């Protein structure tokens, strides 16, 4: 005859052994976006980008920045386009374009960092501030 205690003991199984968590790679350090950096980026945008990209919507010749995969991707992609320019056929947001974006490599690392931060915040996913060091690494 099975008693309550023996049934309870028989139904118990040892607790599962948990594996120790693996060491996680620390997330990249977020660099806060300051209002001063956004203001500087907006100024650079107005002086060097808005003539072609307008308020981010582009036109039949110049790509929209709103919804752009380049803007939404890693900051290095946007930095690279600014530093080296881009030409030839491309498709942006489903729109086929064949134009020229001249290199803006005359801008300082600080100006490029500010404008990329601004463009990503204004027209893209936002994210961490871009640093002049990131720009210098792309030069």
Image: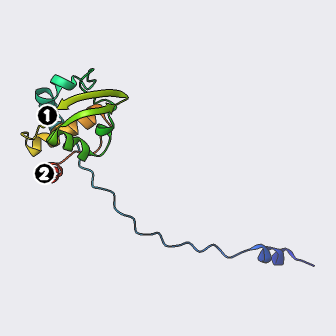
Q: Residue at x 18, y 51 (%)?
A: 134
Give the mark toward the camera: 1 or 2: 1
Q: Residue farthest to the right?
A: 1
- Between the residue at mark 1 and the residue at mark 2, the CA separation in whole angstroms equals 19 Å
**69 or 29: which is nearer to us?**
69
Quick check: 9 above or below 51? below
Q: Residue at x 26, y 26 (%)?
A: 56
The answer to whether marks 1 and 2 mark residues whose Cβ atoms lie closer than 8 Å is no
- The residue that label 2 is drawn on is 136
Residue 102: mark = 1
- The disc, 1 or 2, on the residue closer to the chain's N-terminal end is 1
Image location of residue 136, percent across then percent down = 13, 51
Choose top left, top right, bottom left or bottom right for residue 120. Answer: top left
Q: State left or right for residue 15 relative to residue 36.
A: right
Disc 1 secondary structure class:
loop
Image location of residue 1, percent across then percent down = 93, 79
**3 or 11: which is nearer to us?**
11
Choose top left, top right, bottom left or bottom right for residue 93. Answer: top left
Q: State left or right for residue 139 relative to residue 97.
A: left
């Amino acid at each position: 005859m099975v008693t309550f205690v023996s049934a309870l003991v028989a139904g118990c199984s040892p607790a599962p052994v948990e594996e120790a968590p693996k060491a996680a790679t620390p997330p990249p350090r977020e660099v806060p976006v300051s209002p001063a950096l956004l203001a500087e980026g907006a100024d650079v945008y107005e002086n060097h980008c808005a003539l072609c990209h307008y308020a981010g919507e582009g036109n039949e010749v110049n790509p929209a920045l709103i919804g752009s995969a380049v803007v939404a991707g890693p900051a290095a992609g946007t930095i690279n386009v600014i530093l080296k320019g881009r030409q030839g056929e491309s498709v942006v947001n489903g729109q086929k374009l064949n134009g020229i974006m001249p290199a803006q490599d005359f801008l300082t690392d600080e100006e490029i960092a500010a404008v990329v931060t601004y463009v990503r915040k204004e027209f893209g996913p936002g994210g961490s501030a871009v640093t002049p060091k990131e720009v210098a690494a792309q030069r």
